[in-house]
Image (cartoon, rainbow, N blue to C red):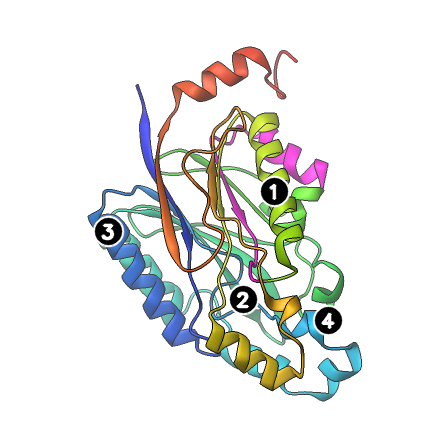
Amino acid sequence: MRVVKAAAVQVSPVLYSREGTVDKVVRKIHELGQQGVQFATFPETVVPYYPYFSIVQSGYQILRGGEVLKLLDQSVTVPSPATNAISEACRQAGVVVSIGVNERDGGTLYNTQLLFDADGTLIQRRRKITPTHYERMIWGQGDGSGLRAVDSAVARIGQLACFEHYNPLARYAMMADGEQIHSAMYPGSMFGDAFAQKVEINVKQHAMESGCFVICATAWLNADQQAQIMKDTGCEIGPISGGCFTAIVAPDGMLLGDPIRSGEGVLIADLDFTLIDKRKHVMDSRGHY
C-alpha cells in the first residue's frame, strides 16, 4: 500500500516583502519535514503577496498609483536567490513543494506555480494561462506548455491556479496526463464566504472527475495586513475578507480532515493511493468511462 503524507498550508505573506515571505516559507518547509510531510501546497502567488489592490482599485487608479511598481520590485525571477532558498529548504527537508509566486520576466509579471522535487530540483514552472478579470491589469498571459502533470519523488503532480479550475479543458489536460495529486491554489482572504464555497465546489468536483487527491491552499490576511491594504488603496474591508478554504480532498470527493477557513494553519493527511484505484474502478475519465 502506497501512502504519502501531504500538507495544505494556509499562511500569511510578509506583506510587501519578498525576502520576508521567502524566509517564512523556508521555515515552514523545515517544520513540515520534521513532521514527516512529503508533499505540500502553498497558496497562489503567496510570494511576495497576492495583488489584492487589483480587486479594489479601478484601472485608472492602478495605472496612476504605485502598487504595481511595488509588486514589480518585490516579485521573483527564476532562478534567483529566492527560488534557490526554497529549493535548498526542500532538499534539506526532503519535501516536494508546490508554491505560487509573482514571477517577473523582464517588464512583465506572471502568476506562476513552481514545483520543487524532494531533492530541491525545480521540476515545473507554469504560468496561469489567462489572468482572471481584474488580474489582467497585473499579469501577462501564460501558455499551454504547463498543462501537464509531472513525476516527482512522491507522485505524479498536476497544478492549476484559481479560476483555471473553471476551465474544463485545462482540468482535463491534468486528468488525461494521469495526475495522482493535484495542487490547487487560490488567493484566499477575498470576497467572503461565497468565494470559499465556490472553491470547495471546484476542488471536490475535480477530485472526483480526475480520480486524484486534491491539496488546496488559500492565503490568510491578518487584521494588520487588512488595515495596511485599506490604508494604501482606500478600500473597505469586505472585499479582502473571508474566502479561505484550505483543504485536502480524496478521490471520491470527501474531505480528509476539517478545512481551514480562518487564521494560519496546516492541514496534514495521509494519502492512501488505493483510494485512487477504487475511484477509477468506478469512473476513469481518461479510460473506460
| Nearest to the observer: residue 239 or residue 96 | 239
Q: Residue 245's spot in the image, x, y percent?
A: 52, 49
Residue hosting label 2: 103
The residue wearing badge 1 is 147
Residue type, label 4: Met
Q: Quadrant of the C terminus?
A: top right
Which residue lies at the image location 78% right of the left edge and 77% below the top edge?
Answer: 59
Residue 183 inside the magenta-drawn segment:
yes
Q: Position of residue 247 (x, y in %)?
A: 47, 43
The local secondary structure at tag 3 comes to helix
Of circles 3 and 2, the one toward us is 3
User: Which portion, as a residue range, is magenta?
Assistant: 167-189
Residues tagged 4 and 2 counted as in contact (Cβ below 8 A): no
**What is the distance, in whole Å, between disc 1 and disc 2 at their CAs?**
18 Å
For marks 1 and 3, give the one nearer the viewer: 3
Residue 242 picture quarter: bottom right
Q: Is residue 280 visible to the viewer in this orientation of the structure?
A: yes
Task: Residue 26: say if magenta.
Answer: no
If you read the primary sequence from the N terminus, does the residue marked by circle 1 or circle 3 appear first? 3
Q: Nearer the viewer, residue 48 or 151?
A: 48
Q: Residue at x 30, y 55 (%)?
A: 29
Q: Amino acid at mark 2?
A: Glu
Mark found first going from the N terminus, 4 or 3: 3
